[in-house]
């Protein structure tokens, strides 16, 4: 770019010159990626001017070549005066570099800039610190985000820029961090090469291509380097910002000892003596408990404390300090300081498999280790905000095993096997090395092994099925472990994100927890609400249903009884009493509980393909299905309830009309849907994972299907099941981010579980239908 601009300047300006070209901003720093802006200051001598034709000669070739050019035309005095009023102009000017033209105006610029910084440097330092703090508050953290913005996220290139600005203003040394800078710049350059326009967010779908461009084996290796570099940059930036904030007179008062060997001096934590792992953990435990920062000297000592061989066996002082660290309100901050100090190599070698590791599912937003740190903090929030979790923890008593298990619950990820199984093995080894008693070691191992048990069972199984409750109770084995597991489940879900812990999911997990606790404490498997109780509640709400409520409810699966409110049940009974004929439809649309959602309830004659037809009509009208539940009655009716996001409320009118047409057999639904699906999704690449679970229910065969959320996918799945003449007794449909997780309890035409031969055909039938829609 320098060479091109010099050539353009020679051609446009001629030997007389008149304009000095100065690179500023990223161009001035010599940091350019393929789609970077070209930031220029056209510097004029006092009293001179530049013609529009001359500027066109300089800039048009760059524009024609596709570059984004930011330029200003000013004298040196004007440039510095503007910088004194504009923060972006001020920081841009700090990297000013002569490219072409007369040196005189540039020398005047640097001289005026030096004198301005001598006068106003302190205010600019405060402005840089304030702007960086504000950006950190609104952006994600590149060292922990699965799809970081390499430029503007905390720990990104903009933090390096801020450090450079501060060094330029104060005259201090520029932070080295050359390796970290090189990693982020290389990743940004490769990322730009994958996009037709400027893109600084390292999206998950582009990470494999960027990794190949840079010579990494895979995207995980790339992201481990990116995450590690960004963490170092963020930590250094945070430390410099703290130093800026701490400048000024010391507060009066003597140091106070807050723990053995740890004192609070002038608002910062420090300790005396030679640093070792035990003292360092005591210091970080105090940080976690009090939320006070570490002194600069204490921060430096952390690296020394953990520059030792891995601990083969923890002493009681190390273990107790580590547990206190986990038990504090600022636990995740203390854990991040351990990470920065390289402590995991010494304390938990098992951690190396998940440090900076990306996650490949639709729920998570952060790295495996970042999520684990957040989960520890989420335990403390759950004990305050979740009444059931608070009561469970109170009844369980001592929580050391819970805190350690929460930290380690995902330690098996990246092992190549089921991470719960691998995690159990690694957690047992780690807990024994920490010196926990044998009983606590087994509790930690069990919590890690079964940390997904409650949420997976609650969302994918019929909780009215006694065998489901018995199976969970057998795996958990004790009321104390179940109580701790419930708290861990809440913490894991809330630390994942909004899609990982919805109110619906939380209610199901609570129900499963309560039922399993009763089973463990009494030996009796509880049942859901009985028909008579529910009928009395409905009749109290709607006396006109007194003669029919109990009779109608008795025809529905027991799991229906707690699936709806009393008002919804009353409306459902009215639909069922109207008993639509074959080819007829009874439907209603109600407002959803969330803004922009509606609830569609459909009653039709029960036959193979009934759920598929409703799903197809919704897809034809571009209505997004968030959740769905379907139930078959003993009188040959199907009751379906969909929570949807229609986008346009008028679409629901088209849906109700489309249902009449579809169930009357007056539309070639699949042919139309196939064409529409191809308009909105790629012609290839939609595949699903189909699992048939025979032992999950004594009365039905359970089918689990997972895949990408795609227009028409639910229709294709349910149509595949109907091709085998299967009766969908109960269905649970959920859209979780960009993925769907669907569970179907199916029976054959005789109302029995499927035999092995018929069950083996399900994946083939579903895959065939999916391929037909998305061919």
Image (cartoon, rainbow, N blue to C red):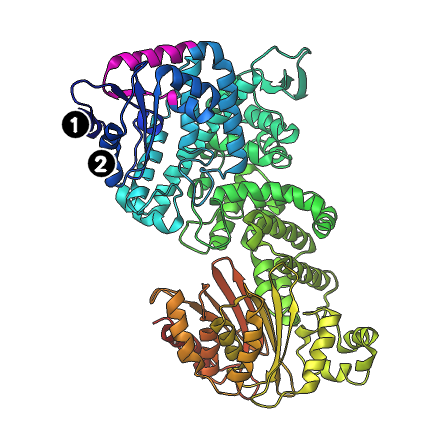
Name the spot of residue 338 as percent of width and height, x first. 51, 31
Name the spot of residue 584 as percent of width and height, x first. 59, 87
Residue 772 vertical placement versus 58 (above, below): below
At horizontal 45% and vertical 9% (from top left) the residue drawn is 118
From the viewer's perspective, tell me whether residue 9 is left or right of residue 31: left
At horizontal 38% and vertical 76% (from top left) the residue drawn is 768
At horizontal 60% and vertical 59% (from top left) the residue drawn is 454
At horizontal 52% and vertical 63% (from top left) the residue drawn is 735
Residue wearing tag 1: 11
Q: Nearer the viewer, residue 387 or 257?
A: 387
**Label for residue 295?**
none
Residue 674 vertical placement versus 440 (above, below): below
Span of residues in magenta: 93-115
Tag 1, which secondary structure?
Answer: helix
From the viewer's perspective, tell me whether residue 142 is left or right of residue 76: right
Nearer-N-terminus badge (2/1): 1
Assess disc 1: are there few (<14), some (14-19) or many (≥20) residues with their C-alpha within 10 Å of its C-alpha.
few
Q: Is residue 606 visible?
A: yes
Name the spot of residue 696 as percent of width and height, x first. 56, 71
Q: Is residue 478 magenta?
A: no
Give the number of marks. 2
Assess disc 2: are there few (<14), some (14-19) or many (≥20) residues with their C-alpha within 10 Å of its C-alpha.
some
Residue wearing tag 2: 61
Q: Nearer the viewer, residue 757 or 427?
A: 757
Quadrant where the N terminus lies? top left
Residue 288 vertical placement versus 740 (above, below): above
């Amino acid at each position: 770019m320098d060479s091109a601009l010099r050539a353009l300047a020679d051609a446009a300006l001629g030997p007389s010159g008149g304009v000095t070209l100065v690179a500023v901003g990223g161009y001035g720093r010599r940091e350019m990626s393929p789609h970077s802006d070209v930031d220029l200051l056209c510097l004029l001598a006092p009293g001179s001017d530049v013609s529009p034709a001359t500027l066109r000669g300089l800039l048009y070739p760059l524009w024609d070549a596709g570059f984004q050019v930011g330029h200003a035309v000013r004298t040196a005095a004007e440039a510095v005066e503007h910088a004194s009023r504009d923060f972006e102009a001020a920081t841009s000017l700090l990297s000013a570099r002569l490219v072409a033209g007369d040196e005189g105006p540039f020398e005047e610029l640097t001289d005026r800039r030096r004198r301005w910084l001598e006068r106003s440097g302190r205010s600019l330092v405060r402005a840089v610190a304030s702007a960086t703090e504000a950006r950190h508050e609104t952006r994600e953290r590149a060292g922990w985000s699965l799809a970081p913005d390499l430029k503007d996220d905390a720990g990104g290139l903009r933090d390096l820029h801020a450090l450079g600005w501060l060094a330029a203003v104060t005259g201090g040394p520029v932070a080295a961090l050359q390796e970290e800078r090189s990693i982020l710049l290389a990743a940004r350059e490769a990322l730009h090469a994958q996009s037709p326009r400027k893109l600084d967010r390292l999206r998950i779908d582009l990470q494999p291509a960027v990794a190949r461009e840079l010579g990494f084996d895979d995207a995980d290796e790339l992201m481990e380097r990116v995450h590690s570099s960004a963490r170092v940059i963020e930590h250094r930036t945070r430390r410099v910002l703290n130093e800026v904030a701490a400048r000024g007179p010391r507060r009066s008062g003597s140091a106070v000892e807050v723990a053995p060997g740890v004192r609070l001096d002038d608002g910062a934590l420090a300790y005396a003596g030679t640093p070792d792992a035990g003292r360092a953990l005591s210091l970080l435990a105090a940080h976690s408990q009090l939320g006070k920062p570490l002194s600069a000297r204490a921060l430096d000592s952390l690296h020394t404390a953990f520059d030792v061989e891995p601990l083969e066996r923890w002493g009681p002082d190390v273990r107790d300090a580590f547990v206190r660290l986990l038990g504090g309100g600022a636990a995740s901050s203390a854990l991040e300081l351990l990470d920065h100090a390289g402590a995991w190599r010494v304390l938990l070698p098992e951690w190396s498999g998940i440090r900076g590791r990306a996650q490949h599912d639709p729920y998570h937003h952060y790295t495996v280790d970042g999520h684990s740190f957040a989960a520890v903090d989420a335990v403390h929030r759950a004990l305050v905000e979740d009444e059931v979790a608070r009561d469970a923890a109170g009844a369980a008593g001592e929580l050391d095993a819970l805190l350690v298990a929460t930290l380690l619950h995902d330690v098996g990820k990246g092992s190549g096997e089921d991470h719960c199984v691998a995690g159990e093995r690694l957690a047992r080894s780690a807990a024994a090395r920490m010196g926990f008693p044998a009983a606590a070691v087994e509790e930690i191992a069990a919590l890690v092994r079964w940390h997904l048990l409650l949420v997976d069972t609650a969302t994918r199984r019929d909780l009215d099925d006694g065998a489901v409750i018995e199976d969970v109770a057998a795996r958990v084995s004790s009321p104390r472990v179940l109580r701790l597991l419930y708290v861990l489940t809440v913490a894991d879900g809330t630390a994942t994100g909004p899609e990982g812990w919805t109110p619906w999911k939380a209610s199901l997990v609570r129900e499963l927890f309560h039922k399993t606790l009763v089973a463990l404490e009494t030996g009796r498997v509880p049942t859901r609400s009985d028909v008579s109780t529910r009928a009395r509640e409905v009749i109290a709400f709607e006396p006109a249903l007194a003669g029919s409520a109990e009779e109608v409810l008795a025809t529905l699966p027991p799991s229906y009884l707690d699936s709806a409110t009393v008002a919804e049940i009353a409306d459902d009974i009215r639909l069922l009493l109207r008993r639509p004929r074959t080819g007829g439809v009874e439907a209603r649309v109600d407002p959803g509980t969330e803004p922009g959602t509606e609830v569609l309830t459909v009653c039709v004659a029960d036959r193979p393909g009934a759920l598929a037809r409703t799903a197809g009509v919704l897809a034809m009208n571009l209505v997004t299905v968030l959740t769905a539940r379907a139930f078959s009655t003993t009188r040959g009716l199907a009751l379906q309830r969909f929570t949807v996001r229609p986008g346009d409320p008028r679409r629901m009118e088209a849906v109700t009309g489309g249902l009449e047409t579809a169930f009357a057999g007056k539309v070639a639904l699949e042919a139309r849907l196939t064409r529409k699906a191809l308009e909105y999704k790629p012609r290839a690449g939609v595949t699903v994972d189909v699992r048939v679970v025979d032992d999950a229910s004594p009365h039905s065969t359970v089918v689990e299907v997972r895949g990408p959320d795609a227009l028409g996918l639910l229709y294709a799945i349910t149509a595949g099941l109907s091709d085998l003449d299967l009766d969908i007794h109960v269905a649970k449909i959920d859209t979780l981010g960009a993925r769907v997780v669907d569970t179907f309890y199916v029976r054959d035409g005789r109302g029995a579980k499927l035999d092995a031969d018929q069950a083996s055909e399900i994946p083939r039938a579903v895959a065939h239908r999916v391929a037909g829609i998305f061919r």
